[in-house]
Amino acid sequence: AVCGARMRAQTAVKRRGTRVYRAGWYRCGFAADKGPAVCEHRVWYRQDRLEGALVGKFREAMTPARVAALADAVNARLVKALGASGERAPGLKDEVLRLERQAGNLVRFIAESGESAAVRDELRSIESAIAGLRLELAEAERSQVAALPQVHPSWVMARLAELDRLLREDGPRARLEIQKHLDGDLAIRPLQAAAKGAGHAFEITGRLNGNSLLAVNQEAACATLVAGAGFEPATFGL
């Protein structure tokens, strides 16, 4: 938020006697590479503190009640979509039968009256339409018997727990995972520390994408419906 540059994640190594200590930090890329003439934001932020605060905000936003409401809304859309697909089947069958009768009449006309280029073209057009409708009908009937994918609140909460594990064990993967749940960039701003020894105070602002925790559920079929569920990203500051 000070100069618009990207924060850089890096590991600092300290040695005390025979012991080696490693810690992850974030710092401003411009301040590191170009110095105070470009950016005076020279604070180093502890990676575990900063990322832990961010995951804590995810947990705060994804309360059990909110997760349950999101899951219910998405599952309702899935049921509605499946119902709409099933409702198409009878109409498709009627249309196939109607076109098959037309095709039969044209075949009889050709048999009785002789070859006609115009009639033959019409027959090919009808046969092509029948083939397309049969494919659509088969898809509609498959959707009626397929297992309906469901979004489970417990699965969403498990994904949040997985973020905690990744932060402890695999920082780069954790950062990639966090990016999936953001709508745009985050901005970090240094603040005046409340008291000496309290560490560097900071403020992070951004927007959470609530859909992201649902959009990659166990069934890929959920993704399109979840993306259209209409949940607005939540603006936050911490």
Image (spheres, rainbow, N blue to C red):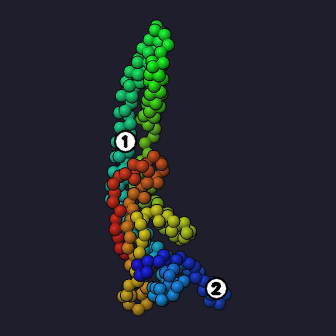
Taking the spot 41% from the left edge, 92% from the top edge, the residue there is 196
| Disc 2: CA contacts within 10 A as few (<14), some (14-19) or many (>=20) | few
Q: Residue furthest top?
A: 112
Q: Is the N terminus in the top left, top right, bottom left or bottom right quadrant? A: bottom left
* Disc ID at residue 19: 2
Question: Closer to the camera: disc 2 or disc 1?
Answer: 1
Q: Is residue 90 above or below residue 30?
A: above
Taking the spot 37% from the left edge, 24% from the top edge, the residue there is 94
Q: Is the C terminus in the top left, top right, bottom left or bottom right quadrant? A: bottom left
Q: Which residue is mark 1?
A: 81
Marked residue nearer the N-terminal end (2 or 1): 2
Q: Is residue 88 above or below residue 216?
A: above
Q: Quadrant of residue 200?
A: bottom left
Relative to the observer, which residue lies in front, 209 or 163? Answer: 209
CB of mark 2 within 8 Å of CB of mark 1? Answer: no
Question: x and y percent of residue 231 in the render?
Answer: 34, 57
* Disc ID at residue 232: none
Taking the spot 47% from the left edge, 77% from the top edge, the residue there is 5
Taking the spot 33% from the left edge, 54% from the top edge, the residue there is 230
Relative to the observer, which residue lies in front, 11 or 129? Answer: 129
Amino acid type of the residue that numbered disc 2 sits on in the rendered structure: Arg
Question: x and y percent of residue 81 in the render?
Answer: 37, 42
SS type, badge 2: strand
Amino acid type of the residue that numbered disc 1 sits on in the rendered structure: Ala
Q: Residue furthest front?
A: 117
